Image (spheres, grey):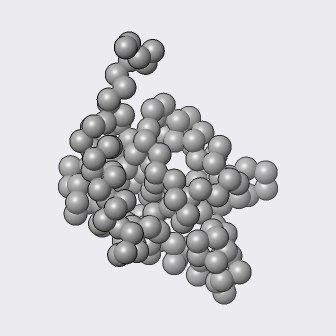
Amino acid sequence: MQYPFKNFHHVPVAAIYCLDPRFRTQHEQFISRELGFKDFDQYVFPGGPKVLADETKRNIFLDAIQNVSVNLHHIEKIILIAHRDCGAYGGSKAFSDPVAEKEAQTKDLQTAQKILLERFPKISVSMFYAEIVGEKVEFNPVE
């Protein structure tokens, strides 16, 4: 069978983000339009990158990335996106203020990045924090 797409088994990027429907379309548009990756593997889970900070779920998730994105699709980059008011964290109400909320999620992003780089040292990892501002979603890089 001939597939209608060019090279199905080369996808340059894997993206890990939350399944929150408020962000679904914006995640895809940000990765494809802003970052320029038309094709990417999507790993969508409550809390997104937070799953990698959870020792009980981490290995299943890492194995999926290894088996599909690394071995089959030969990714070169992983994009991690966390977002404000994430239900997996208890929403914004679980924090004293937006700064504390962003700090907690940034810590999990950094933990996820460290774990990914240890497992996949040849793959770069970029991190972003998304916030709804007015009628749009802003994606800000995280160091």
Where 58 falls versus 10 (above or below)? below
- Identified at 31% across, 36% down, the residue is 73
Quarter of the image for residue 94 reads bottom right
Q: Say whether residue 71 is left or right of residue 99.
A: left
Q: Say whether residue 14 is left or right of residue 75.
A: right
Which residue sits furthest front? Answer: 1
- Identified at 67% across, 74% down, the residue is 91
Q: Which residue is more in the foreground, 17 or 128?
A: 17
- Identified at 59% across, 63% down, the residue is 83
- Identified at 27% across, 37% down, the residue is 72
Q: Position of residue 64 (x, y in %)?
A: 34, 52
The quarter in which the C terminus is drawn is bottom left
Where 1 falls versus 78 (above or below)? above
Q: Position of residue 41 (x, y in %)?
A: 43, 41
Q: Position of residue 61 (x, y in %)?
A: 37, 59
Q: Position of residue 3 (x, y in %)?
A: 41, 17
Q: Is residue 124 visible?
A: no
